[in-house]
Each structure stands twice: as structure tokens, then as C-alpha cells.
């Protein structure tokens, strides 16, 4: 039985989540929707990297596997979303299991390189096999998903659609952490030889971690495809994989809250820095001159902020969150 | 330490919210144009020149009173060639009441086209995007306005046929950057190889495209084509010119599609002289000797400012042309709107009303486009320049090629 406090916080959060789409303008909803997709992907990557200790920079490629699987199902077989999304996830999980095989033999930086190879191989395959990519342009246009008889068009409708998957992703990850599988992941991360001696089947659990993580990635890829209305390989290149890695490192490895905070941070920060600089440029009415420099300043500031956060709090935003909470608790008058 | 960090976090959060909430208000007679820019990211060398050119043109038109009393308010947003940043840009423009978008980047065209069609906001993508979008029935809100990669491929083949006296039984090579944009001309080239009876061989350069000596050697020594068409861009374009030269390939038997032989590419290869003889495809005029460039020059002079360094170069002219088509569409829209706020749907009709006559005043800077509801490409006009003595020298006038085969390939002709 959850504590009263927890029940109230869940209720409060639910009210906020339900109220937001009716208060916020479409523009903000579109940003929140991008964050939602990022959260699903980041939670998945965190299960692999944060919980199991297997570093991967092929996350973008797994997303593309999900995206193209779903796009082909939707266009060729008119699959509804409740088929396309799990199918995309399942195909990504399958590919993830194959990519995970080297992790049985190699670790650390060598595994990173092998997942990088997977990223490039998958990109190449999608790019050149017309049966997958649908032609030289490697993009497949996908109609909007239909939920309960109505087609999702507005950002508000997408908000509810995506929020449902975010909630599912969080609940599944929370529960996974409490099962034998979740505990086995952590044992492997902390010391794989010790874990093996304790009777944990390393082969099975490492591959399971790759599969679960890729399933999340695949689902995120399908959601992204639905959101954009197109599966296009340029949306899943190596830069995307690095962005996701940045999310979980900045957010906090091995923590779901960290994944969420990291996804918000990495999605919103570039937008804010850009607008901040544009606003400043307008204030001093030199925008045309400044226009040349803003993008470069933005990248510099973005990089500098990330370094600052990491130096100040290497355990990520999640640790910062806990510190802030403890700090506020101390401020509360004694009862 | 923790306390300070918490304070810092709160400050950052407050700053984020205020910044995201601040927006400028639009006047009723403003025409808001979204200008997608890449001043940073992988294509920044192009973006820095092109965005400046578009801004210059809107400023010029506004300084002369706008069109029919309407002023332009271009909102430039840098998207770094990244899709999420493009989505945010689009939503921000929508919030500001955008009526038309100047796109940049195939990935952005792909990820925004469905939204644009639903919101009925037209966008222009000259020389990139997807060739199928010249079909206005299928893509009512996308306007390539200039020759797509299919038209460029067709023009390249026609030009080759003229230079080597006929195509039947000849050998044509296609050297391309191996990504969707680089590959796009291939279906058109294959269709033409079949119909015109020439032997086509394609040579792909994998990303990042900085090494292609093997392909170029294979091409020059083994295949020995009668003519070569290249579709390289970015770093690959400059590497390509150098590699062809080193392999001893005669550059006057090669034509680059629209993004492959700009000054920026040749400078990176070591100067214009490296490309001596190379043919370059354009969908606009090159050089500084056009009336609109003179007008921009006068504007800078009257402000007492120095001209931008890229003034009159290929990329500068390209986005000057791009902005000019937006302005012409707005002019047609404004003539029927008469003081009422111009809507995005009016802009779409504006684009579909652009004719060769309405572009005559640009004295050759713009091709004789004839955009209709069915043909959003306006005919697919190309003119070819040759690099001679460090300058672009006009080799052909504007022409179009193989419209029927193009219609077959994009599936327009039933």
C-alpha cells in the first residue's frame, strides 16, 4: 500500500498533466510532445547504460528500426497504431539482441565501438535496401494515427497520445527495477564476475537488457514517425544517438527521474539559449549583425552549460533534484 | 555548493519560462515569412551566405514601401540541420502568424510537409527537397519553384547530348554523394538511359565524402565516360573537383548539379582555377550585374555600409532569387487582398499565379517560371555556366528537358 504522501503526489501530478493541454498554447505543447518522445527513448537507453552498465551509441539506429518497421506496416498493410507500435518495438528488440551479442565478449570502450558499427550498418542498410526505405529518398510518408475512430491532428491530441506511452514506459521501467531481472542488471553493472558467481546468467541478462532498451528505442522511433508524419533516416543519425547519451548522463545514470530530467534539459536548453540570444539581440537592435554570431554563441553556451552541470554535479540532474528536495525539507519548520 | 546550485537551477528555470513566453507582436499589414536558416551545423558555410541574402532582399523591398502597402517581417530561425529544432521553429512561426516558409534542408522538408499541408501554409524548397513535390496535386503546399533534382538530371543529360553530339550508345557516368539527396537523380537518369539509349554507370561516394580517389580512378581509367554528371555537395564537392583533376579527367566533359560547383566549393578546393572548364548548373543568374543586385548595392551604399563578402556569388544570388519569388507571390496575393490581412492560402494562390511575365523585371536573374496548380516547379528551368578564367561564363540560356519522362518518373502522368 503506497504511503499517503505518494498517493497525493501521484494525484497532483496527474491533475497537472491533464490540465496542461488545456492551458498551454499549441507551441508549448509541441515542445512538450518532443520531450515526451525523448523521455521514452531516454528511459530505454538508461536501462541499458545506467542500470546494466553496457554503453551504447546505437540508440538512434534502433529508433530507426522501429520507425521503418512501423512505416512499412502502416503503408503496406494499413496497420493501426496498436499493431504498429509494438511491432516496431519488437523488431528493434530483435535487432538489439543481435547487436548485443558482442557485449558478451567485450566491454567498455570496445563495446561502444561495436555499437557505433551497428549504428552505421543499420543506417547503411536502411539507406540502400529499397524494400525497407521505400526508394532513393529513404523516406516513407505515414498517415496520422487513428485513435478511437478519430484521427490525431492537433498537438493537444498528440499530447494525450504520447503521454499515455510515457506513463506506460515509466511504470514498466519502475516495475522492471523491482524484479529479479532488474536486480540482475544492477548486479552485472556493479561487478559482472561476482554476479555470475551468484548464479546470474550473464548471457541471458545482457541480451535481455539490449532487447528491452531497444524495444523502448523502437517505440520512441514509431512515436516520432507518427508525430512527424514521415519515417526519414536523417532523423536517426549518429547525432541523435549522442543526444540520447547526453540526456541520461546529464540527467543521471540509472535513474528514471534522471532520464526524464535529462530529456527535458537536452530538448529545451538549445531552444531557450537560442531565444534568449535572439531577444538580447533585439534589445540592442543589432540583430542583423548579431545574427551571424548567435548560432555559434548558442552552441558554445550549450556546451559550457553541460560541462558546468557535470562538474558541479557529476551524478546529474537527478542528484541535484534530491539535494534540492532535502534542502527544502530542512527549511520546513519542525513539527 | 548545493544551495548555490539549487538557486542557480531556480534562476535557469525562471529564465527559461520568461524567454519562452516572450514574443513580439505582429502588425496587421505585416507579411510574416519563416526563414529556415543553417548558420550553424553541417551546412553553415552555405547558410551564412544564403540567410544574409534573403534578409537583404526583404530589407530592400521594405525600404521601398513593401508590396501594395504590406511590409515583410522575415523571422529567421537557425535549425542546425536538426529535426526537433525545425519543428520548434515551425511552431514558433505559426504562433507569429506565418503565411509562407522559405525552407532549407531535405530533412526539414520531409518532417514539416505533413504539418504544412494540414495548416495550409505553403513552403518553398528551390533545388532540394523532394522531386515528387513538383506535382501540385499531390503536394499542394510544397513549391520547389526551381528545378528539382529530376529536372537537373534531365538538363544534365540533354546538355551532355549537345556536347558529345547525340546520346545513343554513349557512356555517361554519374558520381554522387551517397545519401538520399545525392541519390535522388538516379531514377530519372535510369529512365533517360533507357529512353535515349545511353550506357549509364553510377559511382557512389559514401559519407563523409572526403575520399573518392578510388571511385574517380575507376571512372576515368576503366569506364572512360563520354560525359560525367556529378551530384556532390558540402566538402565532397571540393574534394570531387580536386580528385577529378588529379586523375586527369577533362573537366569540360563534366557538369555539376546545382549544389556542386559554387564559389565556396571551389575556394575550398584551392581556388576557382582548380575548376577550370567545369560546367555548373544554375536555376538563377550568376554575377553582380542584375538590377536587383544593383538595388541592394545602392541600399548598402546609402547606409554607408560595406557590401557582404559573398555579394554576387552563386549562393547569395540563389537566396536572393528565393526571397524574390516569395515577394512576387505576396505581390499577387496582395493585389487581390486589398488591405485585408494576407492569409497563407492567399500566398499559395500567389505562388500558383507566378508567370514568366511577372518575373521579366528581374532581367534573367530569375528563370521564366510558369507555376500552376499542377506544376509547382514552374517548368524545371536550368541554365549552365562554365568556369573560365576564374569566372562563371554563361554556356547556355535557360532551358528545360524531357518533361514527359519526368512526369512518368514522378508518376504524375497516368
Image: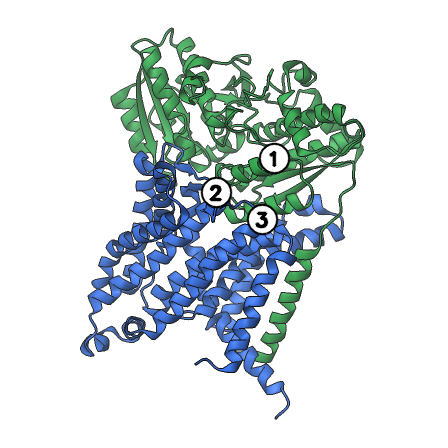
What chain does badge 1 belong to?
A: B
User: Where residue B213 appears, x then y in whole percent?
Assistant: 32, 33
Q: What separation in Å lies between label 2 and label 1 (alpha carbons)? A: 16 Å
Outermost residue, top side: B165
Mark 3 on the same chain as mark 2: no
Instruction: Determine the secondary structure under disc 3.
Output: helix
What chain does badge 2 belong to?
A: A
Q: What separation in Å lies between label 3 and label 2 (alpha carbons)? A: 19 Å
Instruction: Determine the secondary structure under disc 2.
Output: loop
**Which residue is the site of mark 2?**
A144
Residue A258 shows up from this direction? yes
Colour assignment, chain A: blue
Provide the letter of the chain coloured green.
B
User: Where residue A74 appears, x then y in whole percent?
Assistant: 38, 41
Mark 2 on the same chain as mark 1: no
**First in sequence: mark 1 or mark 3?**
3
The crowd level at tag 3 (other Cα within 10 Å; few <14, some 14-19, many 20+) is many
User: Where residue B298 appears, x then y in whole percent?
Assistant: 76, 28
Amino acid at each position: 500500500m503506497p504511503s499517503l504522501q505518494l498517493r497525493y503526489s501521484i494525484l497532483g501530478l496527474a491533475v497537472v498533466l491533464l490540465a496542461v493541454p488545456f492551458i498551454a498554447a499549441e507551441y508549448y505543447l509541441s515542445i512538450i510532445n518532443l520531450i515526451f518522445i525523448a523521455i521514452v527513448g531516454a528511459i530505454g537507453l538508461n536501462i541499458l547504460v545506467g542500470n546494466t552498465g553496457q554503453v551504447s551509441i546505437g540508440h538512434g539506429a534502433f529508433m530507426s528500426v522501429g520507425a521503418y518497421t512501423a512505416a512499412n506496416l502502416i503503408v503496406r498493410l494499413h496497420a493501426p497504431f496498436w499493431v504498429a507500435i509494438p511491432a516496431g518495438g519488437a523488431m528493434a528488440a530483435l535487432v538489439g539482441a543481435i547487436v548485443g551479442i558482442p557485449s558478451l565478449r567485450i566491454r567498455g570502450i570496445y563495446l561502444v565501438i561495436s555499437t557505433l558499427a551497428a549504428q552505421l550498418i543499420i543506417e547503411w542498410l536502411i539507406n540502400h535496401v529499397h524494400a525497407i526505405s521505400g526508394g532513393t529518398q529513404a523516406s516513407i510518408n505515414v498517415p496520422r494515427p487513428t485513435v478511437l475512430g478519430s484521427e490525431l491532428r492537433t498537438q493537444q491530441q498528440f499530447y494525450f497520445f504520447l503521454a499515455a506511452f510515457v506513463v506506460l514506459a515509466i511504470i514498466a521501467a519502475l516495475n522492471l527495477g523491482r524484479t529479479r531481472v532488474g536486480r540482475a542488471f544492477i548486479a552485472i553493472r556493479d561487478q559482472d564476475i561476482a554476479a555470475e558467481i551468484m548464479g546470474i546468467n550473464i548471457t541471458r541478462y545482457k541480451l535481455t537488457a539490449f532487447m528491452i532498451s531497444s524495444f523502448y528505442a523502437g517505440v520512441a522511433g514509431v512515436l516520432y514517425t507518427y508525430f512527424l508524419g514521415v519515417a526519414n533516416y536523417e532523423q536517426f543519425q549518429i547525432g541523435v544517438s549522442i543526444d540520447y547519451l547526453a540526456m541520461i548522463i546529464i540527467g543521471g545514470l540509472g535513474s528514471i527521474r534522471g532520464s526524464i530530467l535529462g530529456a527535458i534539459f537536452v530538448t529545451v536548453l538549445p531552444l531557450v539559449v537560442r531565444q534568449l540570444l535572439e531577444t538580447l539581440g533585439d534589445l540592442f537592435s543589432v540583430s542583423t549583425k548579431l545574427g551571424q554570431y548567435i548560432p555559434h554563441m548558442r552552441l558554445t553556451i550549450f556546451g559550457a552549460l553541460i560541462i558546468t552541470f557535470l562538474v558541479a554535479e557529476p551524478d546529474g540532474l537527478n542528484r541535484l533534484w534530491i539535494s534540492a528536495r532535502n534542502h527544502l525539507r530542512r527549511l520546513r519548520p519542525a513539527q | 555548493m548545493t544551495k548555490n546550485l539549487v538557486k542557480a537551477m531556480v534562476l535557469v528555470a525562471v529564465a527559461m519560462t520568461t524567454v519562452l513566453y516572450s514574443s513580439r507582436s505582429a502588425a496587421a499589414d505585416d507579411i510574416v515569412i519563416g526563414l529556415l536558416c543553417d548558420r550553424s551545423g553541417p551546412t553553415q558555410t552555405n547558410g551564412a551566405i544564403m540567410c544574409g541574402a534573403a534578409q537583404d532582399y526583404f530589407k530592400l523591398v521594405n525600404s521601398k514601401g513593401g508590396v501594395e502597402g504590406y511590409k515583410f517581417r522575415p523571422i529567421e530561425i537557425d535549425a542546425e540541420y536538426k529535426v526537433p529544432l525545425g519543428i520548434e521553429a515551425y511552431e514558433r512561426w505559426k504562433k507569429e502568424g506565418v503565411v509562407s516558409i522559405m525552407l532549407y534542408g531535405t530533412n526539414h522538408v520531409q518532417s514539416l510537409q505533413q504539418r504544412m499541408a494540414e495548416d495550409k501554409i505553403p513552403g518553398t524548397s528551390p533545388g532540394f527537397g523532394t522531386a515528387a513535390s513538383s506535382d501540385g496535386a499531390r503536394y499542394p503546399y510544397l513549391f520547389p519553384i526551381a528545378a528539382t533534382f529530376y529536372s537537373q538530371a534531365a538538363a544534365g543529360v540533354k546538355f551532355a547530348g549537345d556536347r558529345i553530339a547525340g546520346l545513343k550508345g554513349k557512356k555517361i557516368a554519374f558520381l554522387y554523394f551517397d545519401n538520399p539527396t545525392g541519390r535522388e537523380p538516379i531514377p530519372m537518369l535510369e529512365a533517360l538511359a533507357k529512353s535515349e539509349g545511353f550506357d549509364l554507370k553510377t559511382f557512389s561516394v559514401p559519407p563523409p565524402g572526403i575520399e573518392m580517389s578510388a571511385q574517380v580512378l575507376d571512372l576515368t581509367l576503366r569506364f572512360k565516360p563520354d560525359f560525367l554528371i556529378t551530384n556532390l555537395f558540402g566538402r565532397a564537392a571540393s574534394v570531387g573537383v580536386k580528385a577529378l583533376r588529379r586523375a586527369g579527367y577533362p573537366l569540360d566533359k563534366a557538369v555539376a548539379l546545382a549544389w556542386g560547383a559554387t564559389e565556396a566549393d571551389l575556394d575550398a578546393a584551392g581556388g576557382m582555377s582548380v575548376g577550370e572548364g567545369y560546367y555548373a548548373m544554375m536555376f538563377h543568374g550568376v554575377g553582380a550585374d542584375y538590377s536587383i543586385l544593383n538595388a541592394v548595392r545602392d541600399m548598402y551604399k546609402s547606409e554607408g555600409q560595406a557590401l557582404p563578402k559573398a555579394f554576387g556569388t552563386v549562393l547569395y544570388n540563389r537566396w536572393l532569387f528565393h526571397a524574390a519569388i516569395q515577394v512576387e507571390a505576396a505581390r499577387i496575393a496582395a493585389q487581390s487582398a486589398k488591405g485585408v490581412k494576407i492569409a497563407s492560402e492567399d500566398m499559395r494562390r500567389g505562388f500558383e499565379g507566378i508567370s514568366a511575365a511577372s518575373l521579366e523585371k528581374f532581367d534573367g536573374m530569375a528563370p521564366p517560371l510558369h507555376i500552376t496548380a499542377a506544376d509547382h516547379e514552374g517548368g524545371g528551368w536550368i541554365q549552365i555556366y562554365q568556369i573560365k578564367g576564374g569566372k562563371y561564363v554563361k554556356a547556355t540560356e535557360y532551358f528545360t528537358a524531357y518533361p514527359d519522362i519526368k512526369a512518368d518518373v514522378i508518376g504524375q502522368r497516368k
